[in-house]
Image (spheres, grey):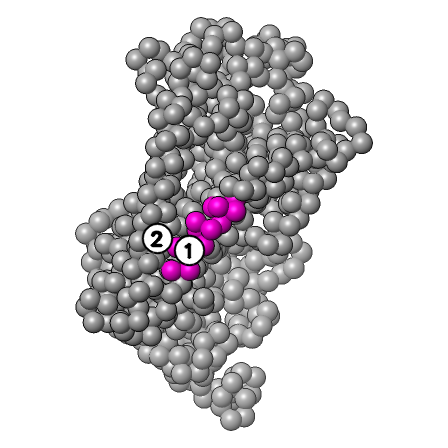
């Protein structure tokens, strides 16, 4: 199959259909997560989402402004310690701490950013690495009551637990044993959603445009009157505020904060997440967060049977396998998971913007292939492949091996493309009815439509069943 | 009174003396050019005019006001804009976003909308490409967007850094016609070029810069006829 399976015009009725399918999948994923996963796995998911927000913060500076800043673990730490101290020592509620954390993070961003942004490239990287390296020792300083606030080397626990109030117990997964982490999951999802919304709007605003312009061309931006130092510093400070917010979420989720949680190793994880997720993409942060947390977890589990001995349950080869996966990613997905995903989804559905006059922007190969269309055949193959791979995945599930288990999971997930086959099939049938396709299209197209619809129904039914069973 | 003026400018990069006692003045509505070979100090002159380089001695005067130590944005707000060398579009932003960034410092919404229409009138192609990422445009289209972006700041004087660089010969011709068109709307234009023949064919006056010094300052016709210039820039046949 060369080109794309189907090409749609941006904002057309057909494009909207695809969007609904995407949103439905996202909603299904979010709803099922706290229901299907074990409590400790929900905890990991929370951790992944928090890392996602922190990576988004790094992305604001590195991906959207083109500045190499590597020390955001320190901003996360500041947010976490401010939260822990305000909640534990001053008896504030978490939500009351949010504005404090954002303002403190912003000011710290200005303080670090003003001198740091005078240097560029590797020098900025060096300054911010120093910032990340020095932070864990700063929290142990005995002067100014710092150590009392941060708990010094012992860390600081928050004794108040985050428990769902009775009027929120209807949230999926929030009841009894799973209540704690599932409730925190929903709080974190809400905060992630709001943060994403705000950052999307920020990047579309006038200052946001200036930030992007500086990344694309610093001299060019200056020529049109963009005040480079001010825009860069403000952007760095906003990024620091978002990083601090991730710190607040960390404290809220774990209930315990220690200096050694926010070392340079965390900063490295953030950079790994950023590069693997996708530099300069909004979704990249969250994808990167999921990658860092879950793949780290997976490599630990894989390496256990391979290792000669195990230290606190982790396989000794975990880091080596993780490194190998990173290397493979840089070869096969150099633009990150988000751009790999876009490449794959472009093979299925390509969205083409239109000119104001309504004509598609060139090159418009395959916008409507007419009588030559082979889409029905491809869609039919897709509609058959989905259920077959699902079946294979199901069989492999019974093999008691982690690697095979992961493979089986991936195979079962291929059924998610069923609506693509369904919509392409029905489109081709419509084109046939309008006389734009030969009669030979009719058979494969209706098969793709029907089998795809069955597959889609199966996905919805499966999700509903899991939902009802556990709820 | 000149719109934009350099008075006795000396500029150093570290120990290197780049510009040596440069004097030049651009009057309202004029089309003037600065010629010079590689490393003659053309780009530094532009950067000095726009405030991206601060001279060691001498003054930059904008509309009678000494702006030597004022920021670039201060000068852009008062009507100086540049079309940078190689166009320098924001490649990952759409054409529309590029144009909007040209009006970055303006707050008069009606004026911005008017100027956007004016750009569309001048370049219908830009309007067609409005939602496209500017990095995907052809060289000629990119040049249109770059000029359109500069016009969006409603300039009184437009500085152009090597407008013919990196364009196909046919496009160079169109490009210079474009410059004349903008000039006819009353915008003063200061072209910095290596392509002396083309620049002098449309300019009123010109200067020739050699190793940081203004060696010739005359009308375009006189410069075109100058045997010294012909020998060093235009070659025997009169084309570069």
Per the image, label 1 sits on a secondary structure element best described as helix
Q: Position of residue A248 (x, y in %)?
A: 48, 21
A464 displayed left or right of A232: left
| Numbered mark located on residue B126 in the image | none
Q: Position of residue B4 (x, y in %)?
A: 38, 60
Chain holding disc 2: A
Evaluate whether label 1 is on the same chain as label 2: yes
List the single residue furthest toward the bottom.
B237
Q: Position of residue A19 (x, y in %)?
A: 31, 47
A216 displayed left or right of B108: right
Q: Position of residue A330 (x, y in %)?
A: 62, 51
- Residue at image point 44% right, 42% down: A283
- Residue at image point 33% right, 47% down: A454
| Numbered mark located on residue A384 in the image | 1
The residue at which mark 2 appears reads as A451
Q: Which quadrant of the view contains residue B64?
A: bottom left
Which secondary structure dominates the residues rendered in magenta?
Answer: helix
Of residues A303 and A355, the one nearer the viewer is: A303
Residue B48 position (above or below residue A86): below
Locate the N terminus of chain A by quadrant.
bottom left
Mark 2 and mark 1 in contact (Cβ < 8 Å)?
yes
Residue A74 position (above or below residue A122): above
Instruction: Say whether residue A360 is magenta.
Output: no
Locate the C terminus of chain A by quadrant.
top left
Task: Magenta stretch: give its range.
Answer: A380-393
Residue A289 position (above or below residue B151): above
Chain holding disc 1: A
Residue A421 position (above or below residue A396): below
Residue A322 visible in this rendered orientation of the protein: yes
């Amino acid at each position: 199959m060369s080109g794309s399976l189907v090409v749609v015009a941006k904002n057309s009725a057909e494009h909207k259909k695809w969007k609904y399918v995407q949103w439905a999948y996202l909603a299904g994923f979010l709803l099922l997560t706290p229901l299907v996963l074990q409590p400790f796995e929900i905890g990991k998911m929370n951790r992944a989402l928090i890392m996602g927000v922190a990576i988004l913060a790094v992305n604001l500076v590195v991906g959207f402004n083109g500045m190499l800043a590597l020390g955001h673990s320190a901003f996360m730490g500041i947010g976490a310690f401010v939260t822990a101290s305000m909640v534990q020592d001053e008896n504030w509620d978490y939500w009351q701490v949010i504005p404090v954390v954002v303002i403190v993070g912003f000011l710290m961003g200005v303080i670090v950013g003003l001198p740091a942004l005078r240097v560029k490239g590797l020098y900025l990287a060096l300054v911010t690495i120093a910032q990340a390296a020095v932070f864990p020792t700063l929290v142990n300083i005995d002067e100014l009551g710092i150590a009392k606030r941060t708990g010094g080397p012992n860390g600081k626990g928050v004794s108040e637990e985050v428990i769902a109030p009775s009027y929120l117990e209807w949230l999926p997964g929030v009841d009894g044993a799973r209540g704690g982490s599932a409730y925190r999951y929903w709080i974190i999802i809400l905060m992630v959603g709001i943060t994403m919304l705000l950052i999307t709007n920020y990047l579309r605003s006038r200052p946001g445009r200036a930030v992007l312009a500086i990344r694309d061309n610093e001299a060019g931006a200056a020529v049109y009157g963009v005040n480079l130092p001010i825009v860069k510093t403000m952007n760095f400070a906003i990024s620091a505020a978002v990083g601090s917010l991730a710190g607040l979420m960390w404290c809220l989720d774990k209930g315990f904060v220690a200096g050694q949680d926010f070392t340079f190793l965390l900063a490295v994880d953030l950079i790994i997440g950023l590069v693997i997720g996708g530099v300069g993409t909004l979704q990249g942060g969250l994808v990167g967060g999921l990658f860092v947390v879950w793949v780290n977890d997976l490599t630990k589990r894989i390496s256990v049977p391979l290792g000669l001995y195990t230290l606190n349950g982790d396989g000794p080869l975990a880091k080596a396998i993780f490194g190998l996966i990173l290397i493979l990613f840089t070869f096969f997905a150099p633009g990150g998971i988000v751009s790999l995903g876009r490449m794959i989804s472009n093979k299925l559905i390509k969205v083409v913007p239109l000119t104001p006059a309504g004509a598609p922007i060139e090159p418009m190969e395959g916008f409507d292939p007419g009588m030559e269309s082979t889409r029905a055949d491809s869609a039919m193959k897709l509609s058959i492949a989905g259920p077959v791979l699902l079946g294979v995945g199901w069989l492999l599930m019974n093999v008691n091996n982690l690697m095979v288990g992961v493979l089986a999971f991936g195979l079962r997930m291929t059924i998610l493309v069923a609506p693509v086959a369904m919509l392409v099939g029905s489109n081709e049938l419509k084109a046939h009815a309008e006389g734009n396709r030969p009669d030979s299209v009719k058979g494969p197209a209706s098969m793709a439509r029907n089998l795809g619809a069955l597959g889609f129904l199966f996905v919805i039914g499966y999700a509903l069943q899991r939902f009802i069973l556990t709820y | 009174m000149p719109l934009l003026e350099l008075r006795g400018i000396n500029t150093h990069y570290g120990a290197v003396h780049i510009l040596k006692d440069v004097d030049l003045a651009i009057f309202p509505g004029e089309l003037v050019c600065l010629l010079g070979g590689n490393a003659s100090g053309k780009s530094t002159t532009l950067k000095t005019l726009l405030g991206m380089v601060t001279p060691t001695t001498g003054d930059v005067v904008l509309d009678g006001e000494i702006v030597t130590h004022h920021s670039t944005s201060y000068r852009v707000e008062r009507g100086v804009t540049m079309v940078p060398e190689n166009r320098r579009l924001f490649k990952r932003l759409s054409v529309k976003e590029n144009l909007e960034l040209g009006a970055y410092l303006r707050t008069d919404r009606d004026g911005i909308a008017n100027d956007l229409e004016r750009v569309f009138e001048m370049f219908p192609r830009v309007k067609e490409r409005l939602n496209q990422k500017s990095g995907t445009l052809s060289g000629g289209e990119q040049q249109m967007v770059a000029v359109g972006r500069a016009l969006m700041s409603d300039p009184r004087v437009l500085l152009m850094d090597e407008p013919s660089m990196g364009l196909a010969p046919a496009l160079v011709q169109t490009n210079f016609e474009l410059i004349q068109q903008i000039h006819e709307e009353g915008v003063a234009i200061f072209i910095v070029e290596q392509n002396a023949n083309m620049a002098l064919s449309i300019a009123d006056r010109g200067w020739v810069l050699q190793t940081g010094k203004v060696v010739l300052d005359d009308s375009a016709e006189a410069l075109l006829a100058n045997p010294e210039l012909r020998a060093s820039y235009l070659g025997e046949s009169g084309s570069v």
